Amino acid sequence: QAAPDADPLGKGMSNTNQFLAGLNPTNAASVFRITSIVPIGANVVVMWKTTGPRTNVVQAINGGLSGSFSNSFQDISGQIIINVVGDTTTNFTDVGGATNVPARYYRVRLRP
């Protein structure tokens, strides 16, 4: 369970990657993942769990008609500085993001 490449709590990240991301590998609630993507009018609010102190960047890509997408994500936010120590939840509003047709895919990048 303590091996660097182990994921004993099933969080989807190895113990090493959790440590590098600032997470607590022994705490099941300590995660780095998007928890909701909600359209509000023409905008989309992306909410995720993270940890600080770190810097995150929200990225997006528009999907094709078939729902497929490439790995050519682009930064859509500036640097989002997480000024707390430990686990937290934060969000970003993609202004006009709900007007992208047929789909828009999001991810949050941990900036070194």
Image (spheres, rainbow, N blue to C red):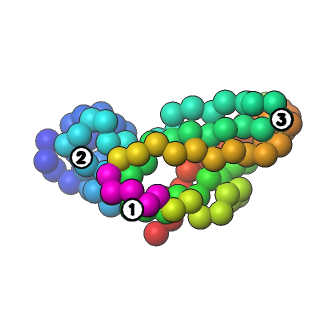
Q: Is residue 84 magenta?
A: yes
Q: Amino acid at mark 2?
A: Pro
* Between marks 3 and 2 in the image, the one whose residue lies nearer the viewer: 3
Q: Residue furthest front?
A: 84
Query: Could you classify mark 1 by the number of other residues whose Cα lies within 10 Å: few (under 14), some (14-19), or many (20 or more)?
Result: few
Residue of label 3: 42
Q: Amino acid at mark 3?
A: Ala
Marks 2 and 1, how far apart at CA: 16 Å
Query: Could you classify mark 3 by the number of other residues whose Cα lies within 10 Å: few (under 14), some (14-19), or many (20 or more)?
Result: few
Residue of label 2: 25
Q: Which residues are magenta?
A: 82-86
| The one of 46 and 108 positioned closer to us in this rendering | 46
Quadrant in which the N terminus is drawn: top left
Residue of label 1: 53
**Where is residue 100 shown, x and y percent of the image?**
84, 38
- Above or below residue 95? Residue 65 is above
- Above or below residue 9? Residue 86 is below
The answer to whether residue 47 of the structure is visible from this angle is: yes
| The one of 103 and 27 positioned closer to us in this rendering | 27
Sooner in the amino-acid sequence: mark 2 or mark 1: 2
Q: Disc 3, disc 2: CB below 8 Å?
A: no
**Where is residue 34 shown, x and y percent of the image?**
52, 39
Magenta residues, dominant SS class: strand
Q: Residue furthest left?
A: 2
Sooner in the amino-acid sequence: mark 3 or mark 2: 2
Sooner in the amino-acid sequence: mark 3 or mark 1: 3
